Image (cartoon, rainbow, N blue to C red):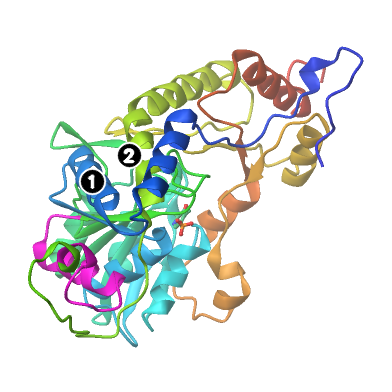
Amino acid sequence: MAPTPSVHGAASLAPIPIAKPFLDTAEADAARDAVLSGWLSQGQQVAAFEREFAAMTGAKYGCAVSNCTTALHLALLAVGVGQGDEVITSSHSFIATANSIRYCGAKPIFVDIDPATYNLDPLCVAEAITPSTRAILTIHQMGMPCDLTSLLAVANQHGVPLIEDAACASGSQIAIDGDWEFVGRPRGTAACFSFHPRKVITTGEGGMVTTSDPEIDSKLRLWRQHGMNVPDTVRHSSPQVIFEDYVSVGFNYRMTDIQAAIGRKQLERLPTIVARRRAIASRYAELLGDVDGLTLPFEPEWARSNWQSYCVRLPDRVDQKTVMQSLLDQGIATRRGIMCSHREAPYAGEERRHSLRQSELAQDHSILLPIYAQMTEDDQARVADALKAELGYGRAA
Ligand SMILES: *Cc1c(COP(=O)(O)O)cnc(C)c1O
């Protein structure tokens, strides 16, 4: 528990959270209007949010779903991942990435990350390809674009589809052949986004799949609503009686219009939110740049992160949990580095073909620092000072 603010004038002890969604009355009013409209699920608000999100990314289609986990599940199914297939991915990710592969009856083949970016190492991916590889599931981890150019080269060479887990990457940019574009255009077959409150824009819960392939898009639309071949909006507006068919076993992965109405307002704010986060990340680099042994996150010259998280690698000599506890005692929330799925019960028994050493080191030696659009300069200085003090920076040796 973070200490409560002291009444003795120590206002600086106000807790600093790890993250904070950025919403106000614009979102609240939009949600209210959606409620009062009388159409509450997968109606005009969802359709508009899909169009606007797709337009932002440059993708032809956007298909809204209930969250990013269901987005990943549908995207993998849509490229044909099924029972017994292998999908190459990173263990060093939120467990939903691996779970989405299991949902398809397929097997995650975990390969290691590039420790500089925490993203899949394309060389490791290339080595892991077998005749059973059905897809590559790459992640734009913590909003940092992964090396899509190299990963696409591997995918194309082997004729394997590439799916992008862009859960954290709304508003991140990547330069391909020198031109900047938003993550999610997509360069792979499909990109999957999350609107959970821990991400840069939120609808409470929510997800989106972007693609430029009309066949993939129509599969997603069919499967997200029970395999039903006539959308509710079409049936509702038709002057003729229409009977729908259920052409396959689908899912209920729909987004509500209340969520979509909030999402449209969030999307308008996305450029401002990303600009703020980028400014905060630059300032962290200034405040922490000269701390001995501390490794700051690396942004390749072809990447512009939305800084969904700001992850620092601690010096090997210090204990991660001790540092985190000390900061927490001062009211500063942190999180440990991204988890490794292969260390959790559902994946511990999975056959280990490849070294995951960099993934494990990243989990054990990194911490995430607070970052959110509303963060004040004072709070940021407090975080930096507390971390420096904890690392003995500036103290006599
Ligand atoms: C958050 C996250 C997910 C899951 O998103 P939900 O919308 O909560 O389902 C998947 N993958 C990664 C990398 C994430 O960070």
Q: Is residue 227 magenta?
A: yes
User: Which residue is located at x 20 percent, y 68 percent?
Assistant: 231
**Separation (CA) of disc 1 from disc 2:** 8 Å
Q: Are marks 1 and 2 in contact (CB under 8 Å)?
A: yes
Q: Which residues are magenta?
A: 211-234
- Amino acid at circle 2: Arg
| Residue 281 x, y percent position in the rendering | 49, 25
Quarter of image, res 340: bottom right
Q: Which mark is residue 332?
A: none
| Residue 313 x, y percent position in the rendering | 59, 39
Q: Which mark is residue 48?
A: 1
Residue 212 visible here: yes
Badge 1 crowding class, 10 Å Cα cut-off, few under 14, some 14 to 19, many 20 or more, is some
| Residue 333 x, y percent position in the rendering | 70, 37
* Some atom of ligand 1 lies within 8 Å of the CB belonging to the residue at label 2: no
User: Which residue is located at x 76 percent, y 33 percent?
Assistant: 327
**Camera-side residue: 264 or 377?**
264
User: Which residue is located at x 44 percent, y 22 percent?
Assistant: 276
